[in-house]
């Protein structure tokens, strides 16, 4: 079977604004680090779109970053860069 008969690799239609949830322990540099990582991969990222939520105990922070991506490889690259940073615990 040739590649063009394969089912799509993803159900996401590109380009799109994609929400990426990034979680980690509360740290003074957490938000700026996440912004820096995403901006390095996607210079059109607008940090004002970030939704921030702290845990009940105040130990962890969750950032939902809405990133305009044009392809699955671009999205995968952003996920990879975020998930390999030591300050970041979870990327969804």
Image (cartoon, rainbow, N blue to C red):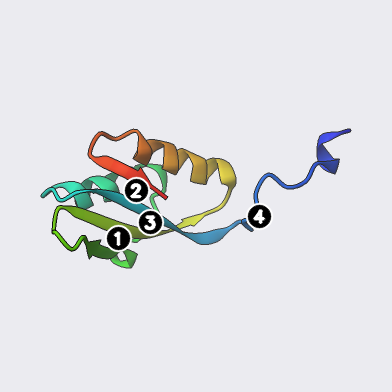
Asked whether the residues under the numbered discs 2 and 3 touch, taking CB atoms below 8 Å apart as contact, a structural biologist would say: yes
Q: Dot 4 surroundings within 10 Å: few (below 14), some, or many (20 or more)?
A: few
The tag earlier along the polypeptide, 4 or 3, is 4
Give x and y (percent) for residue 11: 66, 55
Closer mark to the observer between disc 4 and disc 2: 4
Residue extending furthest toward the right: 1
Residue at coordinates 15% horizontally, 51% vertically from top-left? 26
Asked whether the residues under the numbered discs 3 and 1 touch, taking CB atoms below 8 Å apart as contact, a structural biologist would say: yes
In front here: 2 or 89? 89
CA gap, disc 2 to disc 1?
Answer: 9 Å
Residue at coordinates 13% horizontally, 58% vertically from top-left? 58
Look at the numbered disc 3 and give the secondary structure of its residue: loop
* Residue carrying label 3: 45
In front here: 69 or 58? 58
Residue at coordinates 28% horizontally, 48% vertically from top-left? 34
Closer mark to the observer between disc 4 and disc 1: 4
The tag earlier along the polypeptide, 4 or 2, is 4
Q: Quadrant of the N terminus?
A: top right
Residue at coordinates 55% horizontally, 61% vertically from top-left? 16
CA gap, disc 3 to disc 1?
Answer: 6 Å
Asked whether the residues under the numbered discs 2 and 1 touch, taking CB atoms below 8 Å apart as contact, a structural biologist would say: yes
CA gap, disc 4 to disc 2?
Answer: 25 Å
CA gap, disc 4 to disc 3?
Answer: 22 Å
The tag earlier along the polypeptide, 2 or 1, is 2
Q: Which mark is residue 11?
A: 4
* Residue carrying label 2: 39
């Amino acid at each position: 079977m040739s590649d063009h008969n394969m089912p799509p690799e993803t159900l996401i239609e590109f380009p799109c604004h994609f929400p990426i949830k990034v979680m980690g322990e509360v740290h003074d540099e957490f938000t700026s680090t996440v912004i820096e990582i995403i901006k390095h991969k996607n210079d059109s990222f607008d940090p004002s779109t970030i939704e921030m939520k702290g845990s009940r105990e105040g130990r962890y922070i969750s950032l939902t970053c809405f990133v305009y991506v044009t392809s699955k490889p671009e999205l995968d690259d952003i996920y990879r860069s975020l998930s390999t940073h030591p300050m970041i615990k979870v990327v969804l």
